[in-house]
Image (spheres, rainbow, N blue to C red):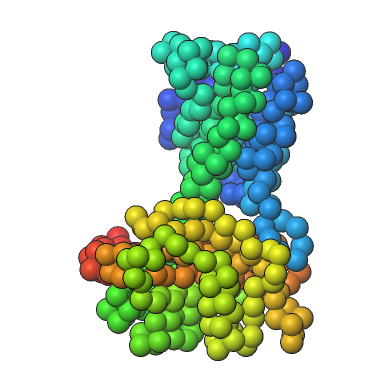
Amino acid sequence: MRTFSKFIVLFFLVAGCVNMKPEAVGSFNSVYVFVDDFELSQLREPLEISLERPIITPRPERLFRLQWCDTSSLDNATKHHIVFIAASLSSPGDWGAYIRMNLSPQALDSVKKGKYNLFVKRDVWARNQILIILTAPTADALRDYVLSNTDKIFKIVNDYCNENVAKWLFGKFEGRSEKFDIEKKIAVEYGFGIRVPRMFDWEKGKADEHFIWLRALEPERWVFVWWTALDSADAGKISLKWFTHIRDSLCAVYYEGDSLQQGFLTYERTTLDGLPGIMYRSRWFNSKKSLGGPVVGFILDDVENSRRYILDGAVFAPGIKKEPYLRHCEVILRSFSHDAKKFLDVVDVRKNQ
């Protein structure tokens, strides 16, 4: 308890002194988790289900990696970007005590009444850090809450990660910056907007083909946007067979025959830029060259403009981890705007920042 008591004192000394705190360090896909030993057996699997989601790639990878910590690793863990504390109010361990000491009386009361279980705090031990606290009156109730809210928990961490990767991806580095001129050209010619990072180029595609391919090298990753006319009667009716056929047909023309490998396609309903659709993950494969890699993308229905979009990103990075580069693709796709005028209005604002 001596280490933890020291930590509590330091917490109160530093919590209000933002300028004293160092910048958070480490990978944005590492999550440092504190759970009391008394409750670890009940919470470990639910938290792994929430965050350690697999990437469909030739070598198994996960979107986030949980680093299980205790008070002896406190000083190192709390320097990192993403920190989790999960403990019930009834836990006799250090982290149960931490939660009881640091939640307000109103917050504790809401937890006891079953009204609130998740709290998000910023910059507790370091700048640009997120602390997520999960709690409930008992360990059983906390386990049930986590299992019932896996998507919510994942979204908080994933959005934070995307937010920070976007700052780097679209930021200035070694005199290079976001390619605003290409963004303007796309918006004017295609009628939609998408952000183009400094390392990406307009590889192929013309507006009359309804297709554009943006590509970066070292390692190779690319995104494309394609659209087709949408009848309002078909809105929301997305056939995965149709999608696979369209994507494989586009890749036969533009990507030297890459196709989606059967048995790897997963999807979920989502909303992007206010448009309903699905987000998918899969694996591409080129049978002629025996090459492959992960895929992430969206199918979106823009009823107002009578368009159905496919937004697709993929990576070819043999011998190295794909997750960071697949996330680059996802972040670019998430910058998509179906309102070209609105997109153009903010391009110059971003350029002059």
Q: Quadrant of the C terminus?
A: bottom left
Residue ID at (46%, 53%): 270
Position of residue 158 relative to residue 221, above or below, is: above
- Of 85 and 224, nearer the camera is 224
Position of residue 305 relative to residue 182, above or below, is: above
Marks counted in the figure total 0
Give left or right: position of 179 versus 8. Answer: left
- Residue 351 visible? The answer is no
- Residue 192 visible? The answer is yes
- Of 186 and 13, nearer the camera is 186
Residue ID at (51%, 39%): 152
Q: Position of residue 186 (x, y in %)?
A: 34, 78
Residue ID at (45%, 62%): 237
Q: Position of residue 301 (x, y in %)?
A: 38, 64
Residue found at the very far front of the displayed protein: 233
Q: Quadrant of the N terminus?
A: top right
Give left or right: position of 51 versus 116. Answer: right
- Of 99 and 45, nearer the camera is 45
Where is residue 24, by image quadrant?
Answer: top right
Position of residue 216 relative to residue 15, above or below, is: below
Residue ID at (48%, 64%): 238
- Of 191 and 300, nearer the camera is 300
Q: Position of residue 296 (x, y in %)?
A: 57, 64
Give left or right: position of 275 versus 348. Answer: right
